[in-house]
Image (tube, coloured by chain):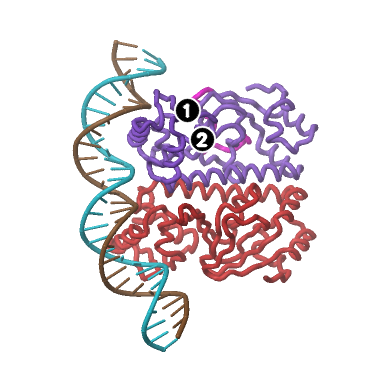
Chain colours: A red, B purple, C brown, D cyan
Amino acid sequence: MVNNCDCEGCELRSLFFNNVSATELISLCTIKIEKTFIKGELIIEEGSEIEDFIYLKSGLVKLYRISDDEEQIITIAKPLDFVSLLSVFSNRHFKYSVRALEDSVTCSLKIQYVKDLVKSNGNFALDLLEKMNRIADNIIIESLEIRRKHLRGRIAHVLLYFADYIYSSHEFDLPISRKEIAEYIGMTTENVIRTLSEFRKDKIIKINGKTIEIINKPMLEKISALG
Amino acid sequence: MVNNCDCEGCELRSLFFNNVSATELISLCTIKIEKTFIKGELIIEEGSEIEDFIYLKSGLVKLYRISDDEEQIITIAKPLDFVSLLSVFSNRHFKYSVRALEDSVTCSLKIQYVKDLVKSNGNFALDLLEKMNRIADNIIIESLEIRRKHLRGRIAHVLLYFADYIYSSHEFDLPISRKEIAEYIGMTTENVIRTLSEFRKDKIIKINGKTIEIINKPMLEKISALG
DNA sequence: CGCGGCTTTGATGTTCATCAAGTAAAGTGG
DNA sequence: CCACTTTACTTGATGAACATCAAAGCCGCG
């Protein structure tokens, strides 16, 4: 836990605390708590009490819930896809868990502090509403997109999600296992592997362990679009 | 379009405008526009510009989007499951359509008016955040629940959704067609019908056209839970 | 009353899960 | 650091779940 007061220079400031005054920022800065998590560490546990408003400063995390002893991945989030976001204002307990997929840094504020800020600073409130709206929208749309596709389309979709949205590169290291991909798209691990192998044989991607290189992106986009 | 100023007596007032002062309520009341829609009518069209903050006063609606010429139903909403809720603060255009499943009445305010209210009234802002959070949560959880179940579990889930959440009765008229159930749970119309027929043969439900009576609810709950 | 959409059932084929079995990789304790 | 254990990955074979195609009856509505 670190609390060095560098919020003014924080790259997230203009994004998250857009409408916070200099005075508010100083107060906020002395209160905020930064935590680091190594890859694989649990950041939020399903069912635990919501005490803090947590956002991701750097790294990558997965949101998931347990159901019938199986993990169901809701979304993979990078900084500014607020982590503690879904139930935070409407529930007393988290409805899902959050785990670091890469070394990550979070910044947290007491939930009451953020609520007070919402009450006292209208522009901040509106900004927060917008952001929460957008995050929820994205999760819902993603979920609908995945649902309407078949196995091959879902795999293609996930690969493009990493390439375009997370890493902005046609070559990247998968931050999750084949099993986790399966948990994300709602299919079995074996079929995820089979499909990846098919894509490799069809010269759409190159695979080297966790490293993926997209060779034929137009084809991948076609498969994703057509399901 | 009606604008009779009865907001003070409106049953939604205490739920939605909990934290709105008497003065604000009067202003709000003269501005709000009430609209009635008959069963089947389009309330919001995907892609149209978001101008109003719309909430459902009475009736029942479906949220859906078009993808590949097919409708994909996001949720079935009753009053207070705010209709114009998902993208309303974060987008310029609606990402989905809303259609009345039963005769419905909506109440709308200019979106700018609500934004101003958020800015000027902190408690209202917090209240709205909570409500939006809850709606988004519910949609996401519902979607995850449906996704993890197989055909029979999904059908059981939908029947229980209507019985418990929408109508609070073990006997009700389905507000949607078999085809729409299929669009909601992501399966084909034929298999929806087949499964309903199976449930009938197994004496779990009685079917008479659109009328459904749940006879063996524990069994239906078991099927829903186990997938 | 006849047309189009909704409903229903059956037959068939595709997609996907399950089971099995083996290899590779990664973590663990002596 | 090596033997050991566990976990992840991979491929194949089989069967179950589901989509698709087809055909016919039904219902509401102009």
> Subunit of mark 2?
B
Residue B138 in which image quadrant: top right
Answer above or below: position of A80 versus A40: above
The x, y position of residue B194, in whole percent, is: 33, 34
Q: Which residue is labeled 1 in the image?
A: B175
Check whether the beta carbons of the residues at disc 1 and disc 2 lie within 8 A of each other: yes
- Is residue B136 visible in this depiction of the protein? yes
Residue in the image at 45% along x and 57% along y = A161
Q: Is residue A92 magenta?
A: no
Residue in the image at 67% along x and 42% along y = B128
Q: Is residue B52 magenta?
A: yes
- Is residue B189 visible in this depiction of the protein? no
Callout 1: helix, strand or loop?
loop
Left or right, A168 with respect to A188, comes to right
Q: Quadrant of the N terminus of chain B?
A: top right
Q: Which residues are magenta?
A: B38-54
Q: CA distance from mark 1 to mark 2?
A: 10 Å
Callout 2: helix, strand or loop?
strand
Q: Tell me which numbered mark, 1 or 2, is placed earlier along the sequence.
A: 2
Q: Amino acid at mark 2?
A: Ile
Q: Amino acid at mark 1?
A: Pro
The x, y position of residue A219, in whole percent, is: 34, 56
The x, y position of residue D30, in whole percent, is: 40, 15
Q: Which residue is labeled 2 in the image?
A: B76
